[in-house]
Image (cartoon, helix red, strand yellow):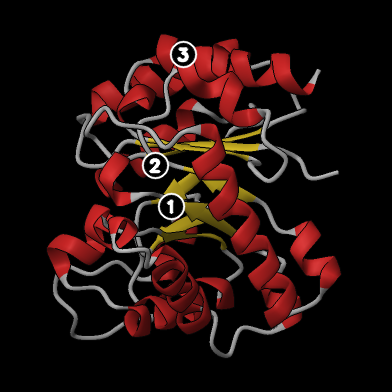
Amino acid sequence: MRTPIIFGNWKMNKTIGEARELAGSIARKIATDRIEIGVAPPFTSLTAVRDSIKGSSIHLAAQNVYWEMEGAFTGEISPKFAVDSGCDYAIIGHSERRQYFGETNHTVNKKLKSSLSVGLKTILCVGELLKQREAGKMEAVVGGQIRECMVGISTSEVRSVVVAYEPVWAIGTGKTATPGQAQEVHSFIRSLLKELYDEEISQLLRIQYGGSVKRDNASILMKEADIDGFLVGGASLEAESFLEIIEKSLEVIA
């Protein structure tokens, strides 16, 4: 059975002090090993959050990494720096990175290889725009992202990958894919993993849903067979709402 995984992506929010306080509030109230839980604060707060969650089961994630380990790349963050800051996970390919900073499947593939090479478990984000869904191109878009981002990733390496499906039209909009819509895509992704790798890998890899996840929809989404957890945005910025999502998910898997 796949262990559910719920991570909070704090994006460009929280000062060091605010991040330390939020992480501590979450850590003090987490008392379960039935769900893998993690947070992804801004880079400036990684070490502060690392110290706040020390001794807990919470994982620390970088919101992004570059594909080179060092060099003349002003403003970029090496995967080695993420590890040095206490991260054991990295998020790559987020829709906002693709939309605002020109990331492509090719560059995400390079980042995935780089992240995995230093031992970081990696959350690979994929998802379609509203116009692409309405045009019936979901499978072509999401399938293309997975195929191109997974190029050169071996069977042993892919075991350290989590796929996060983010319908771009449901991120920060208040809209949410229905459980049926989300399950359809998660099932498609799982079948594609079987095609690219094998049945074992397709059943092993966890697929998160990300797109306006809240307390009110967490349980109905978690009930779907191929939804293994959530990549939470806005609702992870307050300890209470993030913990409620975890509690609702625990009720489903109990």
User: Mark 3 highlights which residue?
Assistant: 216
User: Mark 2 highlights which residue?
Assistant: 47
Residue 253 percent coordinates (x, y): 77, 23
Report the label total: 3
Taking the spot 20% from the left edge, 41% from the top edge, the residue there is: 12
- Seen from this angle, which residue lies furthest front? 135
Judge from the rendering whether residue 236 lies leftward or rightward of residue 164; answer left or right.
Answer: left
Identify residue type, mark 2: Thr
Q: Say which label, 2 or 3, has the lower sequence index.
A: 2
Residue contact at pointers 3 and 1, CB within 8 angstroms: no
Judge by depth and name the residue closer to the eye, 143 or 99. 143
Q: Residues within 10 Å of mark 2 (few under 14, many from 20)?
A: some
Identify residue type, mark 3: Asp
Residue 125 lies in what quarter of the image? bottom left
User: Mark 1 highlights which residue?
Assistant: 85
Q: Residues within 10 Å of mark 3 (few under 14, many from 20)?
A: few
Residue contact at pointers 1 and 2, CB within 8 angstroms: yes
Q: Work out which quarter of the rendered image holds the C terminus and state it.
A: top right
Judge from the rendering whether residue 226 lies leftward or rightward of residue 108; answer left or right.
Answer: right
Q: Is mark 3 on a helix, strand or loop?
A: helix
Residue 181 percent coordinates (x, y): 50, 43
Q: Say which label, 1 or 2, has the lower sequence index.
A: 2
